[in-house]
Amino acid sequence: MAEHTSSSITIDAAPADVMEVIADFARYPDWTGEVKEAQVLASDAQGRAEQVRLVMDAGAIKDDQTLAYTWTGAHEVSWTLVKSQMLRSLDGSYLLRAEGKGTEVTYRLTVDVKIPMLGMIKRKAEKVIIDRALAGLKKRVETK
């Protein structure tokens, strides 16, 4: 089983408000930094994205990827890689938990790149991606 990286942050908003921002893929370029374009390719009966194409630009690493999303209740979403130019696999999730008047958001990520990379360097890259995403999510939700 592949190792994953995870981190959590508390956001001063209700879980539903946080999930609304997570589910609004069209706005990802506004707050994620690395996502330059997001396009929902397929949605479920509730209107939630099932497949999303993301154009990423993280400096030296640029990618065009498609992810499949699974929504579990109102407080969890996970995704897995369908196709990518740079990645062999990518699995991630957001898990929301009400905490006082806010929401604890835990982001888990496992990435396997097509180019050889030491595990330690890969975990550090995952940590940077997670920390940036959580900080961007917090800022977007709290200033919405």
Image (tube, helix red, strand yellow):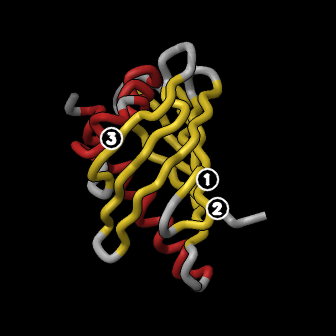
Q: Secondary structure at mark 3?
A: helix
The residue that label 2 is drawn on is 4
What residue do we see at 60% from left, 40% from top? 78
> Where 123 sits versus 49, above or below?
below
Q: Which mark is residue 138?
A: 3
* Circle 2 residues within 10 Å: few <14, some 14–19, many ≥20: some
Q: Nearer the viewer, residue 100 or 70?
A: 70
Q: Can you give x and y, in whole percent of width and height, for residue 23 in the image?
A: 42, 30
* Circle 1 residues within 10 Å: few <14, some 14–19, many ≥20: some
Q: How many numbered marks have been drawn onto this rendered protein structure?
A: 3
What residue do we see at 51% from left, 60% from top? 84
> Where 41 sits versus 58, above or below?
above
For residue 44, side relative to residue 144 (left or right):
right
Q: Can you give x and y, in whole percent of width and height, for residue 58 in the image?
A: 32, 67
Q: Secondary structure at mark 2?
A: loop
Q: Which mark is residue 91?
A: 1
Q: Secondary structure at mark 1?
A: strand
What residue do we see at 58% from left, 44% from top? 79
Q: How far is mark 2 from mark 1, CA to CA?
A: 9 Å
Closer to us: mark 1 or mark 3?
1
What residue do we see at 35% from left, 67% from top? 62
Closer to us: mark 2 or mark 1?
1
Q: Amino acid at mark 2?
A: His
Question: Does the CB distance between marks 2 and 1 fall below 8 Å?
Answer: yes
Q: Amino acid at mark 1?
A: Asp
Q: Can you give x and y, in whole percent of width and height, for residue 67 in the image?
A: 53, 46
Q: How far is mark 1 from mark 3, CA to CA?
A: 21 Å
**Residue 130 sits in quarter:** bottom left
